[in-house]
Image (cartoon, grey):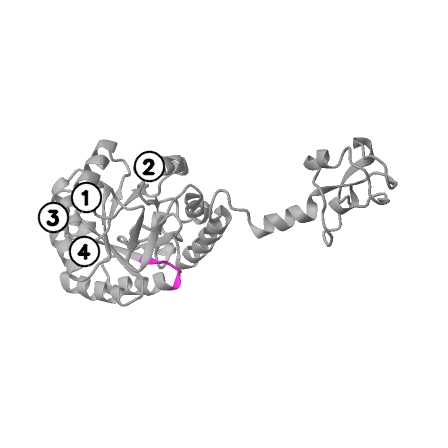
Amino acid sequence: MNPTTVSLGSRAVGDGAPCFVLAEVASAHGGSIDTALKMLEAAFKMGADGIKFQLFRSEQLVVHRHPGRKDFDTIELGTKEWRKLLKAARASGLTLLVEAFDEASLALAAEEGADAFKVHSTDMENPEFIRAVAETGKPVLVATGGVPEEAVREALEIVGSAPVILLHGFQTFPTPVEEIRFRDLATWKERYRVPMGFLDHTDGGSAFALVAPALAVAWGANLVEKHFTLDRSEKGYDYQSSLSPEDFYRMVELLRQAERAVGDAPAAESEGARRYHRTMARSIVAGALIKRGDVLTREMLAYKRTDVRFDPGFPPREADRVIGRRASRPIQADETIREDMLE
């Protein structure tokens, strides 16, 4: 059985650990190693925990007549460039994740010390490649977007005992809000009992793009992946669902606030909640002067907020502990009734 907590580099991912924020470069570097290096630097400043690159060889990814072949050729980085970039990522302090699309790219990333690998949803029905990813010995992130659940189960069987994180979400440049389906995220997590990630592909120019990751955390996401670009106004590759560095930073801040709002445990009560209750809760007080020796009846009592500097006495739900007992001394109107006042 896969563990409920997975280590990505030096970070734990799972319930009880902070949500892992993954900055997704994808094709936003546009085939420029210089841009990719700038994005690496930006990811660190944006507050991301890790960075992810997509490694592919267009010759092995698409046929020559594929409508996107020219773009893939444009954004493809060479082996020497990838080695330079991956080495820089390893030295950046960020966790390095790689989404490889062929075994040669997978081997290159493994050789350069990638901390974990993601299997793209379009490779989820490619058992040989999934097996190759699992054999790296690194954690495997499995994308479920648009994939038949049978294929997901088969992929998990192939992965075996390797640490695994399931990922919910898909890209439609951008993905409409109504197709996010946070409930599915919670369902996957409950069904497979592994850490769950959210791939956020909402419109990077919308206000909702800043809060969607925070909502995912509330639904149980342990990892959030979000695209970013250095300049959205340039409308480069993958800009549709990408945040600017400034907005990415704001998104992380909102996500961290959401974590604090969710709380640590279902039954835990915060000190703030306890303080609020002490200040606002009602106590049993004398509705009018109660003389020494009087037997207390319900009609003699009132339920009011009291001075929190003193003993709050009995809450209204404990009125039966008071009714029928004698006052051991006079109790003034509005005075809190306490145990030492009763016989």
In the depicted structure, whether residue 168 falls above or below residue 250: above
Q: Identify which amino acid the numbered label 2 is placed on.
A: Trp
Q: Quadrant of the rendered structure where residue 212 is?
A: top left
Residue that appears at 39% across and 56% down: 244
Q: Which residue, given by chain and number where applicable, does mark 2 sit on?
A: 188
Q: Identify which amino acid the numbered label 3 is placed on.
A: Gln
Question: In the image, which disc is placed on residue 60?
Answer: 3
N-term mark: 4 or 2: 4
Q: Which residue, given by chain and number where applicable, does mark 1 sit on?
A: 159
Residue 48 drawn in magenta: yes
Residue 204 drawn in magenta: no
Q: Distance between the residues labelled 2 and 3?
A: 32 Å
Question: In the image, which disc is placed on residue 76?
Answer: 4
N-term mark: 2 or 1: 1
**Is the residue marked by circle 2 packed among few (<14), some (14-19), or many (20+) residues within 10 Å?**
some
Q: Distance between the residues labelled 4 and 2?
A: 34 Å
Question: Is 116 left, or right, of 328 in this rendering?
Answer: left
Q: How far apart are marks 3 and 4 (CA)?
A: 12 Å
